[in-house]
Each structure stands twice: as structure tokens, then as C-alpha cells.
Image (cartoon, rainbow, N blue to C red):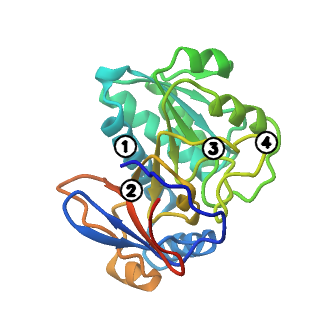
Amino acid sequence: MLYTAVLKRNPFPAALRYYSRSAKMSLKAISSKDAASLDKDLMEIGGWSLDQLMELAGLSVSQAVYRIHPPSKGKNVLVVCGPGNNGGDGLVAARHLAQYGYTPSIYYPKPGKNELYQRLTTQLKSHSVPFITDLPIAIKTSDLLIDAIFGFSFGGPLREPFPTIISQIETASIPVLSVDAPSSWDIEKGPPEKGPGSKFMPEALISLTAPKPCVKFYRGRHFLGGRFLTKDIVEKYGLGLPVYPGVEQIVEVGVDVDVEGEGEGRL
């Protein structure tokens, strides 16, 4: 879906009401604090491991890529990864894309030190997925870019090399899919007022588990991924998640929004 209005820059309200093509649904944006708490609950109470959560998140990202940019539109997918879990989601997505018939490549300027990231890197190398070092050249030879740099834990300010990287992504002429949040955006307040990322508006965004408050400022195709939450978790955080169709790991959501205190608008 396309978002068609620009709303005032202010703190994000408690809930968004989205409409799917088939039925009206209500989704709640979840703060970065609650998102971290939810992940903790999943692992400490629900028995999930970080590996499992990252695998399912990356699978969701790969399905969003297939939905918006099937291989027939171009197989060269550049995945730009940050040093944390968001980057790990990108590494997993790249492995799935290689299995789908794409030709992914990875730009990973600051590899994560966790042993999990090292294993994901080894898996990609075993699939002959290249790790590139020249981002501008890679952008010019790619058909789609996945922005997997920063997720819900990003709080700024940007430190090199990421201001330069985000500026290069921001001015890229190819479609961009951002994972969980457009990198450089404040999770609550959206894009920065100036500097790298201030004009960054990716063509597509996939929110993992639940939308984050910055989605208020987003205009583009919006997907939700993370089909693994239990009823207790959904109720505890009041997420009101949509029904995922069939065996899909993603669902496209948007466009109408009910903003508390502002009435309905187009986001």
C-alpha cells in the first residue's frame, strides 16, 4: 500500500488501525522498550533461542523481498548489514534468497563479534555468497537493496562509517527494503531533521513482530513478519496481530490510520 499524507512530527500514539485488502484490522505500535521486553519474554519464558528468532525474522525478510521484487525483476540483491541483530536478520535473509535463486551479496562493514554472526557468515560463504567492500559500485550493479543496519534498539547518533553508508543508500536509484525501521530513523520520532537519513524513504518496510512507532512517518509498502507469537504474548502487549494467510510468514498491512487525538488520516 501507499501512504498518502504527511502527518505532524510528534510522539507516536498508542495504536494504529490498519486495513488489509480483505478485512479491517487493528495493530498496535510497540515501543523499543517493549520490543526488547517482548524478546526477553520469548527467550526466558517461552523457550525461544536467539538463533530461532533470527532465523524466522530473516525468513520473513526474504519473503518480503520475493513479494515486492521476484527474481524476474532482477536477481542481484545487496544486503547491507549492521553489527547487531538487525544485521543478523539480513544475513539470514541473504541465505534464503540464495536458495530462492537470487544472487545476493553482503556489505558488512562492522561484523558482529557474537559467535552466532560468525556462524551465519560461514553459512553464507558455504553458499558462495560474496562479501563486498565497495558499496557505491555494488549499489550500481544491484537490482534491490536490503537495509538491515539498525533495528528497534537504535538510539543514535550515527557514527562512521554509517553516516556515509546511509547517505549512499538514501541516494541510491534502486528500490530499498528496510528491516524493522529505516536505518538512521529515531524509533519514536521518525527521520532525523537533517543530515544522513533525513530524506530516506525506502520503497518497502518490514516490521518484525509488531510495527514500531516510527512507522507513523513512513510512506510505502509495509509488511509485518514474525509469525511465532503465542496468545499470551499477544495479549500481554496488546498487539492485535492480523491473520497470516496460508503458510505465509508475512502479511502486507496499511493504509488507514486512527491516531488518538488527531482523528483518522492517511499514513
Q: Nearer the viewer, mark 3 or mark 4?
A: 4
Crowding near the residue tagged with mark 1, few <14, some 14–19, many ≥20 C-alpha atoms within 10 Å: many
- Relative placement, left or right, of 231 versus 172 is left
- Relative placement, left or right, of 101 versus 114 is left
Q: Which amino acid does the dot numbered 4 rest on?
A: Gly
Q: Secondary structure at mark 4?
A: loop
Q: CA distance from mark 2 to mark 3?
A: 17 Å
Q: CA distance from mark 1 to mark 4?
A: 29 Å
Q: Which amino acid does the dot numbered 2 rest on?
A: Gly
Q: CA distance from mark 3 to mark 4?
A: 17 Å
Label 2 vs 3, first from the N-terminus: 3
Name the residue rendered at 38%, 21% in the picture. 75
Label 1 vs 2, first from the N-terminus: 1
Q: Nearer the viewer, mark 1 or mark 4?
A: 4
Label 3 vs 4, first from the N-terminus: 3
Q: Which amino acid does the dot numbered 3 rest on?
A: Ile
Q: Is residue 10 above or below residue 150?
A: below
| Residue carrying label 1 | 64
Name the disc covering residue 225, or none: 2
Q: CA distance from mark 1 to mark 3?
A: 17 Å
Q: CA distance from mark 4 to mark 2?
A: 30 Å
Label 4 vs 2, first from the N-terminus: 4
Q: Which amino acid does the dot numbered 1 rest on?
A: Ala
Q: Quadrant of residue 135?
A: top right
Name the disc covering residue 197, or none: none
Label 1 vs 4, first from the N-terminus: 1
| Residue carrying label 3 | 149
Name the residue rendered at 69%, 36% in the picture. 166
Residue 148 shows in the view: yes
Residue 116 shows in the view: no
Q: Is residue 147 above or below residue 243?
A: above
